[in-house]
Image (cartoon, grey):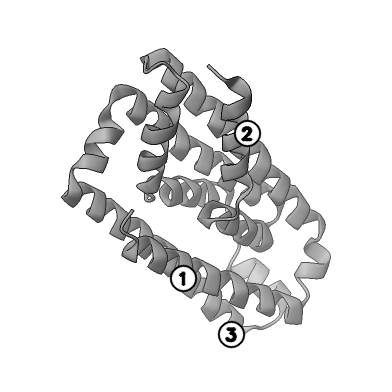
Amino acid sequence: MDVAAFFGISLLVIVTPGQDTALTIRNSLLGGRRPGVFTAVGVSVGQAAWALATSAGLAAVIVAFEPAFVALKLAGAAFLVYLGAQALLAALRGGPVERRATHGALTARAAFRQGVLSNLGNPKMAVFFTSLLPQFGAESFAGLLALGLIFCSMTFVWLTAYAFGVARAGDVLRRPAIRRIFDAILGIVLVALGLRLATDRR
């Protein structure tokens, strides 16, 4: 197994901004460091589920069975569009930060749940894991699962760094004008990612 190649490919994929990154930034901006970190945990748990499914051969079944793949893809896309619409609505409403913080606070549990749903609703993870992991895991259950969990751990570290960074810049980012801009940008990004997921042919 070429460990360096695996880490290189994994790192490239993980640092490329996508829906999990956008969701982590959104939740860190909404609730601070704790929800951001729990979003990262949720995403990593979702990836671990995909790693387990890949190791057991279930992910390949989902990829091969078109109705299941499409249904999962559309559910994941709808979830992203929903979150994006919430962010856009927040940008349009604006209002004092204090009011939004008390009435729209994001709990760690909700952030975790969103992270899990975001990742599990992305069947491209099944395609990615079934194409990547067997190249390095000798197609054994233990080998595939170990590589998948390493990937999950790397993702958690990267997204947690995002959560800490956004939380540290929170005082600036939560200024009403800047917050509305961020809400609008993240809303557009999440909606665009959802639409792309829905229309992508794999």
Disc 3 from disc 1: Cα separation = 18 Å
1 and 2 marks in contact (CB < 8 Å): no
Disc 1 from disc 2: Cα separation = 30 Å
Dot 1: few (<14), some (14–19), or many (≥20) neighbours within 10 Å?
many
Amino acid type, mark 1: Val
Dot 3: few (<14), some (14–19), or many (≥20) neighbours within 10 Å?
few
Amino acid type, mark 2: Gly
Front of the two marks 3 and 2: 2
Question: Residue 53 placed where, x, y %?
Answer: 33, 30
Which residue lies at the image location 60% right of the left edge and 77% below the top edge? 184
Choose the circle earlier in sequence order: 3 or 2. 2
Q: Which residue is mark 2?
A: 8
Q: Which residue is mark 1?
A: 191
Question: Residue 79 placed where, x, y %?
Answer: 39, 61
Residue 162 shown left or right of residue 120 in the figure: right
Q: Which residue is mark 3?
A: 93
The answer to which image quadrant residue 38 occupies is top right
- Placement of 13 over or under 139, stated as above or below: below
Amino acid type, mark 3: Arg
- Placement of 202 over or under 104, stated as above or below: above
Pick the residue in front: 17 or 181: 17
